Amino acid sequence: MARELSDVLHYFLDEEEPSSAAGCPVIGMPAHPDDELRGAIQEALTTELQQLGREAHGIRPGWSDLAASELPPEPGAPSYTIEGAAPPPLGDQVRRAQERLATTKTAVVLVPLPTDRPWEPEEAFLLDRCWLTSRPSDVGRAEFFELAERILSLRPQASVGITILGVDGIEEARSAFDALSEIFTARFDRTLRSYGLLLDAQDLLGGRLTSGRAATTLRDVAQLLCDDLAPTHPTTPTPPAPERNPRGEARFQ
Amino acid sequence: MEKPASSEMRPALLEADQPLDLLVEGMLGVGASIDWVCRNSEGAVVLVQWAPAGESLVAWAHLTAQLRWVEPRLADWQTLAPERDLDASLAPTAFLVSPEFCPRTRELAGLPDSPISLARWVRLDERGWLLPESVPSTPASTSRPQVAGPPGNARAKTSGRSVVSRPGSHFRTRLRDEDL
């Protein structure tokens, strides 16, 4: 039987390392699982990205991956979790979602990364593009830098972006971001990406909003994220392009 | 001046500063037809509408309504015609083409958030050309799609507004205080 080069090529090439590079973009969103506000923000962001035409899929750790429109079961409803069975690893869930979305050009997978446990090396690819939120308080700043340290120690080439919470206007958010960005650059020698601000974030706890400051600013955040996502895949590699610091030096190289 | 035929408009669109690929002509929009539906090099949908002399203001209103009608349908178009390579995440923009524009239309086109640009249609050497129409500028209008070519990539869904940044600051937002 005649064979072509593609039929035997795998004999000569290394096994492909599983990673997100071949799939749609993944946005890692580190947060404590008990943090209801951040959970609500992440869900609302998934929905907003869908509104902007992105095929956004939110992953729920321990669950099968769900679209944002699919809600968890009502309290008292039968659980889908098999007792005693360990939930599938987060990285596997994301890869399955990526496989399913392989032909969807506008797909993006959003994955909450639980901060109450160590992240496994196999999950490191989920950190390639991280989106965090932070408040301009001492506690908020400390929490942000602790997370940034964790992310960059496991994934030195990660792109870290942030949305400012707990402010009352654009100028206040700008000042808060600039302060964080300056320290971030000095400490990690890389650029912190800005994803705007989120006002009245607590309003998102009640479900999806269509008006008001929370809805307006969330839409802006989603649009900024959309802008940074590669328009197509799989022809475009997932990890964001190396950024340059204000001194113009290439990073991640 | 008569409305140009699609066979005459197509090369003019292709030769614009930012070339536009004509996808559909005479598409039924909301309550009326959209003369030409195009795609720019980034995959954004650009509506092009002809306005007879003296009717540019009415055509502006028509285009505004059609833009609003088109936007939520982009994802469906993308699904139905993937070979067109449309990017539904990009907000649609529009181009109003006319042999002349009234002062009120030109004022509207000078608004900083306008997703509609103006182009004058002229016939030279037995063919049609699209020439950018200068509009009254405002200090805030620098971020809008320039009329020096067909509307480009307006990524902000709501306004076609660029990201506002400040020298020395990497903070990004498209919002202004008055939006909040």
Image: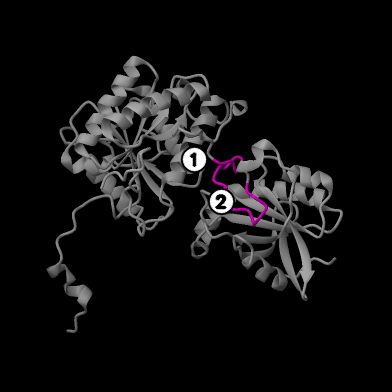
Q: Quarter-wise, where is residue A15 in the image?
A: bottom left
Q: State the mark number for residue A175.
A: none
Mark 1 or 2, which is nearer the eye? 2
Q: Is residue A200 visible?
A: no
Residue located 76% across and 49% down the image: B60
Q: Marks 1 and 2: same chain?
A: no
Q: What residue would you read off at disc 2?
A: B153
Prevalent SS, magenta region: loop
Quadrant containing the C terminus of chain B is top right
Q: Nearer the viewer, residue A152 or B179?
A: A152
SS for tag 1?
helix
Q: Is residue A223 visible?
A: yes
Q: Nearer the viewer, residue A66 or B84?
A: B84
Residue located 54% across and 46% down the image: B155
Q: Residue furthest bottom?
A: A1
- Say if B160 sits above or below A185 in the image: below
Q: Amino acid at mark 2?
A: Asn
Q: Which residues are magenta?
A: B145-162
Q: Is residue B56 left or right of residue A113?
A: right
Q: Position of residue B79 (x, y in %)?
A: 50, 57
Please count the marks in the image: 2
Quadrant containing the N terminus of chain B is bottom right
The CA span between labels 1 and 2 is 13 Å
Q: Position of residue A128 (x, y in %)?
A: 29, 42
Q: What residue would you read off at disc 1?
A: A223
Question: Within 10 angstroms of label 2, few (less than 14), some, or many (20 or more) residues?
Answer: many
- Residue A52 lies in magenta, yes or no? no
Q: Position of residue A153 (x, y in %)?
A: 20, 35
Q: Residue furthest top?
A: A138
Q: Chain of mark 1?
A: A
Q: Chain of mark 2?
A: B
Question: Within 10 angstroms of label 1, few (less than 14), some, or many (20 or more) residues?
Answer: many
